Image (spheres, grey):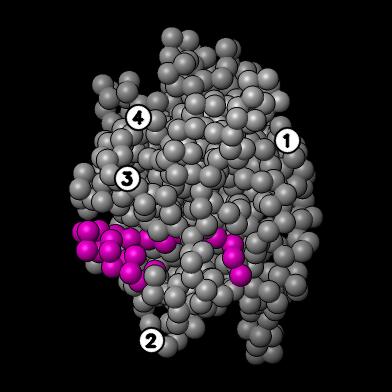
Amino acid sequence: MSQWSKNNDVLSTMNRGNPCESGLCTLCRADCSGKCETWLSSLKGRSLLYPRDFGTVTAGSNNTCHVGVSYNSLRIQGYNYGADGMAQGLSSNPDNCLFTKVNLETSFGNEDPVKCRLPLMTGALGSTFIAAKYWDSFAIGGSLAGIPVVVGENVVGVDRQSKLTGKKITKAPELDRRVETYLRYHDGYGAIIVQMNVEDTRNGVAEYVINRYGDKVCMELKWGQGAKNIGGEIEVDSLEYAQFLKNRGYLVDPDPEDPKVQHAFKSGAVRSFARHSRLGYTDLSSEAQVQENFMQSVAHLRKLGYKRISLKTGSYGMEALAMSIKYASDANLDLLTIDGSGGGTGMSPWNMMETWGVPSILLHAKAREYAALLAARGRKVVDMSFAGGFAREDHVFKAMALGAPFVKLICMGRAIMIPGFLGANIEGALHPERKAQVHGNWDIIPKAVSDLGKSPEQIFACYEDVKKKVGSKEIKNIPYGAIAFCTLADKLAAGLQQLLAGARRFNLNDLARCDISAANRETALETGVGFITDVQDETAKKILEA
């Protein structure tokens, strides 16, 4: 069983499509009936950490994927003695050194740090319709799990119910829905982050948000993402909506106001329109100008009253990477998310996704190198989040170790959306009267789900945990997608605790680069992580020679 295989007999999981490095299918469908590892983890939770059919099987690993430079070519170190990072008051004895006692809490930020129960955050879920459809599941699930959730770009601009007065937003019901859904269950862990691009800046989104929500929201500036090197995109199949978007100031292709295009649409030759955002900084031609513009943008947000500001950058080259780290640190930002190629998308040109940008592991390795250069000069380095094709607990461990001590969170996009889809499909099938409301895609429950039970209490491993948190009355208002979200989060948390315990790290903050090794020489060269048999080799020889 290779991690690149479509089937995993040990876990009884299967990819519908072709799996990528994350283990997800390259094309993840909201109506999928299963059952990749992330899909099944959203139901079974931490039990999927183990091989199936205990008592009748044995299982063996097939480590055949350590080819080339990728996160899969990193290995997790384990140690045979010691216990670092035990909670205060606990002695390092076997009765206390249990994996369940590993502290996974983290925080990011400066004057007013954000506490997180897990080192996870969502990717930016913006104007793509799939984000809007399943937002309740994503936002409520993330809020209950205690992790940051990001409202992506263009949400206001594409909202036909929003209102602009003098080209500035004065009414934004969809943005309000997204923010308020998260805040409804927020208990002090995690944060709601609103992302802002060129059009959002023009529309006055920052001013609207601060006036309505004050310091309850973190504002994120956006330079780019790992999936594409042009602005955000959506596809619409309505001529009227396409014209609305063009009037909002977007590029719409083909032009819905062109009479020839209108005729082609009516005749069926043109069936949809693509809405595009603008590239940023097109009026600037030097690094110094970019720096000045960026600092002015941050100063404007500070003047408006924002206490927490973050930056999201994409898989550009080394110059842009260095600029993002340096400027974010100089501006005293709270978080910098670095998204490598290999990340996901709601809509991007496919061949652009396949061929542009710096692959995640290379970008992240350089980000850590550059951060260390700043730190060596005595500079405070911005807290960072790594993104770009992560789905499992071992991905979280490896990426955080690679970026230690600067990386505080791992950003998951497509993987953490799957439980929202799955839960909605189950809720719609079990309760047909709610199918349209929750955007369910199933009429009947597939066998992979019915094998687990017939009720939500039986199907979702973490149902009772969520019920205990919100109460027996409020559980009726929690979408099944949010319960599935919490179930997946619990699996990722338990798996990460086990990996950390094996590395004798009982506090996430103690994770270090020495806790991973490279499975081939090329990966060691490109990442600066030691080759697997070179790590501790000198110590080993001293033991033998003593």
Mark 2–mark 4 Cα distance, whole angstroms, equals: 50 Å
Helix, strand or loop status at disc 1: loop
Mark 4–mark 3 Cα distance, whole angstroms, equals: 15 Å
Residue plotted at (65% across, 64% down): 358
> Of label 3 and label 2, which has the lower sequence position?
3
Q: Are marks 1 and 4 in contact (CB under 8 Å)?
A: no
Rendering quarter of residue 299? bottom left
Q: Are marks 4 and 3 in contact (CB under 8 Å)?
A: no
Q: Which residue is mark 3?
A: 167
Helix, strand or loop status at disc 2: loop
Comparing 407 with 212, the one in front is: 212
> Considering only vertical position in the picture, is 348 above or below 503?
above
Residue range in magenta is 294-317
Q: Which residue is mark 4?
A: 161
Q: Is any atom of residue 114 visible in this view? A: yes
412 relative to 317 in the view: left or right: left
State which quarter of the image contains the C terminus. Answer: bottom right
The label number, if any, that marks residue 378 in the structure image: 2
Q: Position of residue 72 (x, y in %)?
A: 68, 58
Q: Which residue is mark 1?
A: 17
Mark 1–mark 3 Cα distance, whole angstroms, equals: 44 Å
